[in-house]
Image (cartoon, rainbow, N blue to C red):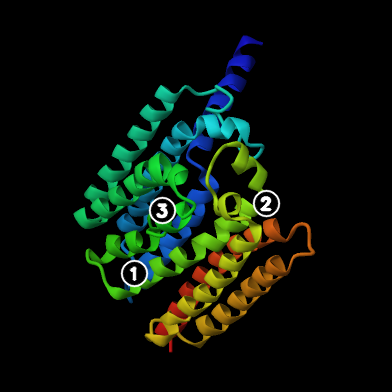
Amino acid sequence: MATLIGARHGQAIWRDYLELTKPKVVVLMLITSLVGMFLATRAGVPWTVLVFGNLGIALCAGGAAAVNHVVDRRIDAVMARTHKRPLAEGRVSPLAALAFALFLAVAGLALLLAFTNPLAAWLTLASLLGYAVIYTGFLKRATPQNIVIGGLAGAAPPLLGWVAVTGHISAEPLLLVLIIFAWTPPHFWALAIHRKEEYAKADIPMLPVTHGEHYTKVHILLYTFALLAVSLMPYVIHMSGLLYLACALVLGGRFLQWAWVLYRGGRPHAAINTFKYSIWYLLLLFIALLLDHYLLLNL
């Protein structure tokens, strides 16, 4: 019986630490990083870069997420969406979480230095600090434009993947960053509308709290138009072909439809449905980029 209880306790602790890394978010980031890697070359990506490069990026992203849990633990405790997080419930101490975050970050950077190149490691470190320190520690509580300004750190993975393969920065990965940068505000503001009362209770100056829902819906619509325009740029600069163009138009059109439904009102779950669709939008858009890339190579 004691062994069984110990096993259950160990499993719970393991899950708590895994939760600190925000694994679902990291998976989406890794998909964009993978696409960045594969788009960077006409040949195959070296397996060491593919495996250890993405592992390094994932570890650093998980470390940044763990810092976010530490800084936001009091906010998380009063929000329904986050009140069961490990630090909010006291299952993991702040000191243990910070030590875990440091371990992940150091391990991730070591892998990037060993198996990719210094530029990829430095850019990953900059992204980590941008999210964990600048966004989480300052911007989130300082301005309703927190998502816009801080979104650059979260938009970095395709650039990190590209640089891990090539060792240099070029226009193409920066365009991928711009796509995610434009996607971030309508994605998070839709959630912020859905969770407006919770953000207000936690005293977080999200746009719906400070400027109202109508103002936020207008900006979601405007950013979605901007996102559609930016998402067509890979085709314009001959980075992708007709398959991607068709997917970008269809996916972007559907995103615009959700943004319009949200703007017009009348559907009680429009905000959360817009948020959910935005996740599928980004995932499918980057998959379309990848499929189109290999289609072009075979023509």
Q: Amino acid at mark 3?
A: Gly
Where is mark 2, residue-wise? Answer: 194
Q: Amino acid at mark 2?
A: His
Q: Quadrant of residue 132?
A: top left
Q: Quadrant of residue 95?
A: top left
Q: Who is closer to the viewer here, 293 or 163?
A: 163
Badges 3 and 2: C-beta atoms under 8 Å apart? Answer: no
In front of the other: label 3 or label 1?
3
From mark 3 to mark 1, how far is it between C-alphas? Answer: 16 Å
Q: Percent position (x, y) of residue 5?
A: 63, 15
Q: Tag 1's secondary structure?
A: helix
The C terminus: image quadrant: bottom left
* Circle 3 Cα neighbour tier, 10 Å, few/some/many (<14 / 14–19 / ≥20): many
Where is mark 1, residue-wise? Answer: 174
Q: Tag 3's secondary structure?
A: helix
Q: Who is closer to the viewer here, 12 or 246?
A: 246
Q: Amino acid at mark 1?
A: Leu
Where is mark 3, residue-wise? Answer: 150
**Residue drawn at 29 percent across, 38 percent down:** 106
User: Residue lying farthest front?
Assistant: 211
Q: Percent position (x, y) of residue 181?
A: 44, 64
**Does 193 sit above or below residue 19?**
below
Q: Percent position (x, y) of residue 248?
A: 54, 78
**Does 4 sit above or below residue 69?**
above
Report the disc number at residue 151. Answer: none
Q: Percent position (x, y) of residue 154?
A: 42, 55
